[in-house]
Image (spheres, rainbow, N blue to C red):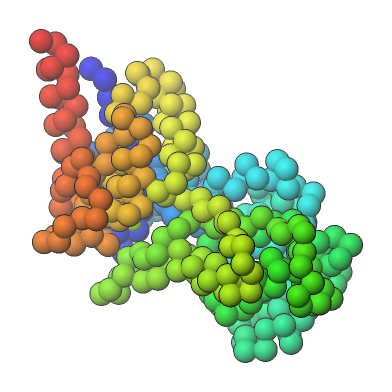
């Protein structure tokens, strides 16, 4: 009998804010054997980030009482690792909270400068900003983001905390051809516009507050709208993260590797469990015929409403999603015997 693989979204499926959802613990007991580890290939696919995959794996292991390896974790910025192949020794501008400088260094970006460093070097560039600033600035120290060494790409690695500061500095960077020190005069149209990448396109996401919160997609809209107010040609950012294909391809790689190690038929069906129709369900529906989308009602999507994107399976919570997936696999098996 072919075995299913599982891909779990985290916020709104397994956790809500810092709290573990009870059905998540039940779900883990169904697919994880304390003595033998994972019964099925499993990955965790989130549009969150701001830390290394290894740190997220450790957090999940502690909260869910299972052993999650860093290879099983795909964060919103994980696909950016691939960009480092061409940008490793080019200056890039980073935006985002948490340990994004550490993450960028681990991915291989050797000339990264963070928006808070730029704010520290040029306080008058963001006069309304009062967020904490880095003491070092690689713009002044190393010349990243000057006319000699302009920024070649802007990476928004997760939701920034100071949208004013980062929107201002990112639009500056785009309009001035990657120069951050204010030395390119306004109206001096630059031929080379830095590439712009966002790690996820989520307009909304769910935490432990009673209503959904704005995410990085909302910040992206602000940057795009501001840029359009200056330039006739819109900026064309690349958005990674669900529902876009890159994280699903990374998930398939880790699931296939686990299946091989388990000696089972790889990726028979991949059940993707999520709470956000526009991200998790749309993404899984688009990822290929072997992906089966499962929508739960413990996060963004609430019972009693009509999902904006139709899932293959609609259940109450992640534990019920496991039951539904295993039931479907048994049916497949019987069909195959007849
Ligand atoms: Mg979610």
Q: Quadrant of residue 42?
A: top left
> In which quadrant of the rendered image does the N terminus lie?
top left
Q: In which quarter of the image is residue 142?
A: bottom right
Q: Nearer the viewer, residue 194 or 299?
A: 194
- Residue 195 percent across, percent down from the top left: 66, 55
Does residue 298 appear in this view? no
- Residue 268 percent across, percent down from the top left: 31, 24
Q: Which of 9 and 146 is in front in this view?
A: 146
- Counting labels gives 0
> In which quadrant of the rendered image does the C terminus lie?
top left
- Residue 169 percent across, percent down from the top left: 67, 74
Q: In which quarter of the image is ligand 1?
A: bottom left
Residue at screen point 24% across, 55% down: 308
Residue at screen point 45% across, 63% down: 217
Q: Quadrant of residue 224?
A: bottom right
Residue at screen point 40% across, 65% down: 203
Q: Nearer the viewer, residue 109 or 127?
A: 127
Q: Which residue lies furthest to the right in this view?
A: 148
In this rendering, is residue 156 above or below 77? below
In this rendering, is residue 158 above or below 123? above
- Residue 62 percent across, percent down from the top left: 39, 53
Q: In this view, does 62 lie to the left or right of 237?
A: left
Q: In this view, does 1 lie to the left or right of 113?
A: left
Residue at screen point 67% across, 84% down: 126
Q: In this view, does 39 lie to the left or right of 139?
A: left
Q: Residue furthest front?
A: 232
Does residue 62 appear in this view? yes
Q: Which residue lies furthest to the top in this view?
A: 338
Q: In this view, does 257 lie to the left or right of 150?
A: left
């Amino acid at each position: 009998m072919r075995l299913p693989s599982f891909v779990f979204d985290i916020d709104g499926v397994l956790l809500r804010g810092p709290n573990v959802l009870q059905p998540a613990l039940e779900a883990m007991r169904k697919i994880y054997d304390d003595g033998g580890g994972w019964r099925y290939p499993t990955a965790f696919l989130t549009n969150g980030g701001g830390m290394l995959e290894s740190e997220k794996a450790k957090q999940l292991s502690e909260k869910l009482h299972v052993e999650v390896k860093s290879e099983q974790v795909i964060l919103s910025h994980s696909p950016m690792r691939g960009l480092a192949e061409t940008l490793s020794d080019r200056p890039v501008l980073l935006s985002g909270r948490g340990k994004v400088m550490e993450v960028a260094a681990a991915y291989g970006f050797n000339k990264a400068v963070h928006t808070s460093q730029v704010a520290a070097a040029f306080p008058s560039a963001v006069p309304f900003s009062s967020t904490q600033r880095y003491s070092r600035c690689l713009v002044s120290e190393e010349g990243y983001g000057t006319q000699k060494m302009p920024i070649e790409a802007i990476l928004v690695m997760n939701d920034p905390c100071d949208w004013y500061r980062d929107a201002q500095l990112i639009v500056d960077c785009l309009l001035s051809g990657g120069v951050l020190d204010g030395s390119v005069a306004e109206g001096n149209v630059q031929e080379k516009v830095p590439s712009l990448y966002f790690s996820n396109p989520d307009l909304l996401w769910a935490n432990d507050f009673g209503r959904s919160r704005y995410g990085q997609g909302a910040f992206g809209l602000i940057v795009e709208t501001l840029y359009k107010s200056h330039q006739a040609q819109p900026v064309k950012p690349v958005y990674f993260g669900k529902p876009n294909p890159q994280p699903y391809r990374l998930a398939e790689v880790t699931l296939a590797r686990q299946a091989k190690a388990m000696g089972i038929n790889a990726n028979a069906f991949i059940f993707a469990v999520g709470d956000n129709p526009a991200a998790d369900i749309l993404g899984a529906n688009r990822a290929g015929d072997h992906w089966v989308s499962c929508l739960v009602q413990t996060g963004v999507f609430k019972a009693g409403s009509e999902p904006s994107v139709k899932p293959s399976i609609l259940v109450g919570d992640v534990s019920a999603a496991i039951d539904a997936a295993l039931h479907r696999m048994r049916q497949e098996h019987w069909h195959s015997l007849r």
